[in-house]
Amino acid sequence: MTRHYAVLMLAIVAEVIATTALARSASFTKPVPGVIAVLGYVVAFWLLSFSMRVFPTGIVYAIWSGMGIVLISAVAWIWYREALDGPAILGLALILAGVVVINVFSKTMTH
């Protein structure tokens, strides 16, 4: 089970890298970030497909997208000084809380 979570976490990291590069690609006018974005998404979806073999699709996608949103927001806030106001932080905290509830309390992740 831990291996499956590790693969899901790697998929999330690949998606965060890809999305960060996509934002820096200037609509694919900068080739290096553009290539990183495309390759990152390919790797992210490839890794995500392994998690979907074991866990329910909706739950995997909820964790992947939720954690991706939180981590991308954190990267943008820390590295690129993109501002987050109170409601944005509250919303991100609620997304994170939802991921925790799924992983801690839901029995669907044990199948």
Image (cartoon, rainbow, N blue to C red):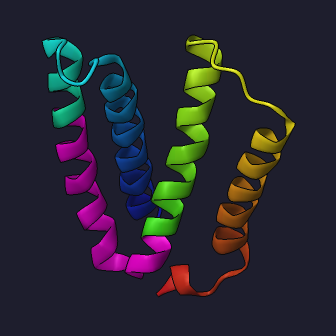
Could you tell me which residue is drawn at 64 percent across and 17 percent down?
78
Residue 2 covered by magenta stretch: no
Q: Residue 30, percent across and down?
A: 19, 12
Could you tell me which residue is drawn at 13 percent across and 14 percent down?
31
Determine the residue located farthest toward the right in the rendered image.
86
Image quadrant assignment for residue 56: bottom left
Vertical arrangement, residue 23 with respect to residue 50, above or below: above
Residue nearer the viewer, 37 or 102: 37
Examine the residues drawn in magenta and state their main secondary structure. helix
Q: Residue 89, percent across and down?
A: 78, 40
Image quadrant assignment for residue 27: top left
Residue nearer the viewer, 4 or 96: 96
Q: Which residues are magenta?
A: 39-60
Could you tell me which residue is drawn at 76 percent across and 60 percent down?
97
Vertical arrangement, residue 76 with respect to residue 38, above or below: above
Residue nearer the viewer, 2 or 78: 78
Q: Residue 44, percent across and down?
A: 28, 47
